[in-house]
Structure formats: C-alpha cells, structure tokens
Amino acid sequence: MADGSVNKYGTISVHLQINDRRHLYKLRLFLGSDAPVRRKYGSKGGYRPGAPFASFCIHCMALVEQLVAYPVTPNKTGKEHLLQALVAWGNRWRWNSRFS
C-alpha cells in the first residue's frame, strides 16, 4: 500500500505499508522535519481494514505550491498526469533552499 495527498491548507500526507516506514524516516530527514512517523490502522471499509501502516504528515504551503507544478494537486484522483510530468522532468529533484 502507498498513498499520499496534499490539500489546499498546505498539508502533505504520505502513507506506506508498515514494512516500508524507513522510507518515511528518510523523507522526514530530507525535508528537515521533526514531524512524527506514526503507526496507524486501516479503517473499516478501506483497503485492508485493521492492517497497520506508517503515516507522515507535514504542513508546508510553499512545498504544496511547488508540487502543483508536477502536477500534485488537491483532488487529483482520476486526473493524474504525474507520470507524464516525471518523464518530461527527467526525475531530477532540485530542492528549493526556502524549505531548508
């Protein structure tokens, strides 16, 4: 399981299966965040109800605004063009110093 979202209030959430939580710690370190990586459980009626997963959420409106260029936007499900953007982008990540 992998899922993520952004919202118009500047929240970025990433959820991975519990065995992949180390990737969330790497993301947290990369972003310079002290936000916790939490253990949560799948909701009833959701994907794998009761199954543990790791969750990481941060609040950074400036980062959300940059993600829109790739295009990671609120309510994008069903409108994904991210793969095309990544191919055009060449998978090059350049961190903007204003987030350090």
Image (cartoon, rainbow, N blue to C red):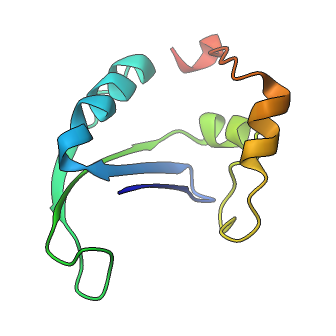
- For the residue pair 33 and 93, the one nearer the viewer reads as 93
> Which residue corresponds to the image point at 28% horizontal and 36% vertical from the top-left?
35
Residue 33 locus on image (x, y percent): 35, 26
> Which residue corresponds to the image point at 14% horizontal and 74% vertical from the top-left?
50
Q: Is residue 54 visible?
A: yes
> Which residue corresponds to the image point at 25% horizontal and 39% vertical from the top-left?
20
Residue 16 locus on image (x, y percent): 32, 49
Query: On the picture, is 22 further left or further right than 96?
Result: left
Farthest right residue? 88
Query: On the picture, is 34 further left or further right than 50?
Result: right
The image quarter containing residue 30 is top left
**Quarter the N terminus occupies:** bottom left
Vertical placement of residue 42 versus 70, above or below: below
Residue 40 locus on image (x, y percent): 17, 60
Q: Is residue 36 visible?
A: no
The image quarter containing residue 31 is top left
Query: On the picture, is 38 further left or further right than 94?
Result: left
> Which residue corresponds to the image point at 74% horizontal and 59% vertical from the top-left?
80
Vertical placement of residue 55 versus 69, above or below: below
Residue 34 locus on image (x, y percent): 27, 28
